[in-house]
Amino acid sequence: MLFKVEMTINIPLDMPKATADKIKAEEKAYSQALQEQGKWRHIWRVAGSYANVSIFDVESNEELHNLLSGLPLYPYMEISVAPLCRHPSSIQSDDR
Ligand SMILES: O=C(O)C[C@H]1C=CC(=O)O1
């Protein structure tokens, strides 16, 4: 199941830089592990914003929820999720 996920990050201004840097490093490792597993298919920075648009490929809504709620930056994110399905005009031979 494919989902578009938009994440906007709002780290509190009073969070110490060392703390923020640690959480960001954990987030990067978590994200890259999921990308290597094929679950986090795409991640794009939204130009001009501390936000990303991502594509996830998971087995269920529950799996997506568990992955997203495990993000180290999750407490500081606004997240929106949209389910995706195949576009009838797509020339791709599969959903990749
Ligand atoms: O920077 C972001 O967009 C937030 C977050 C998502 C993946 C990652 O490495 O950081």
Image (cartoon, helix red, strand yellow):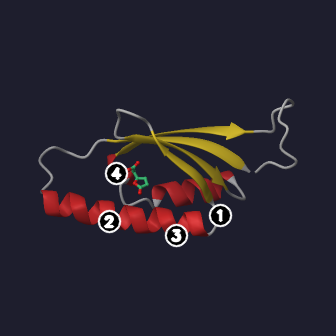
Query: Residue at 66% across / 51% down in the picture?
Result: 61
User: Where does the image place residue 8, in percent across and percent down from the top left?
Assistant: 39, 39
Which residue is under mark 4? 75
User: Where does the image place residue 81, in percent across and percent down from the top left?
Assistant: 57, 39
Q: Specify whether tag 3 is near ligand 1 (CB below 8 Å).
A: no
What's under tag 1, amino acid-wise? Gly
| Distance Cα–Cα, label 3 vs label 2 | 12 Å
Q: In this view, does 61 lie above or below 18?
A: above
What's under tag 4, amino acid-wise? Pro
Query: Residue at 22% across / 58% down in the picture?
Result: 20
| Distance Cα–Cα, label 3 vs label 1 | 9 Å
Mark 3 Cα shell of 10 Å, populated few (<14), some (14-19), many (≥20): few
Q: For the view shown, which residue lies furthest in the front direction? A: 91
What's under tag 2, amino acid-wise? Ala
Which residue is under mark 2? 25
Task: Find residue 38 and name its label.
Answer: 1
The number of discs equals: 4
User: Where does the image place residue 72, in percent across and percent down from the top left?
Assistant: 37, 61
Which residue is under mark 3? 33
